[in-house]
Amino acid sequence: MNISLKRGERIYINGAVLRVDRKVCIELLNDVTFLLENHVMQAADATTPLKQLYFAVQLMLISPNDTDAALYLARDLMSTCAIGLKSDSRVVEGLSLVARLIDSKRYFDALKILRGLFPLEAEATPVPEASCAA
C-alpha cells in the first residue's frame, strides 16, 4: 500500500506517531495498523454518541498496548448508541458489525463503519428550530 503525505502531516502506525518534514510517499510492505491524520477525531469533536464511540475505538488503534479503558468505554457507548438509535435498523446492524470488528481487533475497519453511520445519526437527531424574531 502506498501512502502520500504532505509536509507536516502525521500518520499513526502501530501506535507510533510519525510526522514528515517534507512531501513523502511511504510504501507499507506488510500488514500494519495505521490511521491518517485527517481521520483522527479530536476529543472536542466527539459530540454525539457515535462520534464518542469512534473516539474510543480510535484510542485503541492509536495506543494498541493500552486498550483496556478504551475497550470498556467503547462497549458502554455501544449500548448507549443501540438504545438511542434503535429505531434505525441500519445503525443497529452497523453497531453489531462494529462490535464484531472490535472483538477481532480490526479497529480501522470499525472506524470506517462508524464514519458511515454518522449521517444516519445526524438524520435521527432532531435539529432545534431556529427562532425567528419578527
Image: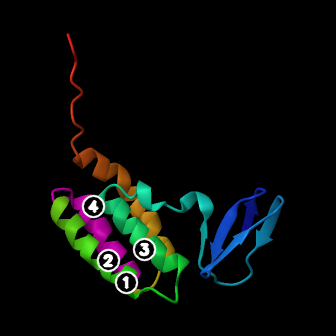
- Whether residues under marks 1 and 4 lie with C-beta atoms below 8 angstroms apart, the answer is no
Q: CA distance from mark 1 to mark 4?
A: 24 Å
Q: Nearer the viewer, mark 3 or mark 4?
A: 3
- Looking at the rendered image, the quarter that the C terminus falls into is top left
Residue type for callout 1: Ala
| Image coords of residue 8 (percent x, y) | 74, 58
Numbered range of the magenta stretch: 85-102
Q: Which residue is mark 2?
A: 73
Residue underneath mark 3? 57
User: Is any part of residue 1 visible from this angle?
Assistant: no
- Residue that badge 1 annotates: 69
| Picture residue at 70% right of the left edge, 84% below the top | 30
Is residue 47 something that shows in the picture?
A: yes
The type of residue carrying mark 4 is Val
Which comes sooner in the sequence, label 3 or label 1? 3
Q: Which mark is residue 91?
A: 4
Q: Which of marks 4 and 3 precedes in the sequence?
A: 3
Q: Nearer the viewer, mark 3 or mark 1?
A: 1
As drawn, the residue found furthest toward the top would be 134
Q: Is residue 91 magenta?
A: yes
**Quadrant of res 82:** bottom left
Q: Secondary structure at mark 2?
A: helix
Indicate whether 16 appears above or below 65: above
Q: Quadrant of residue 97?
A: bottom left
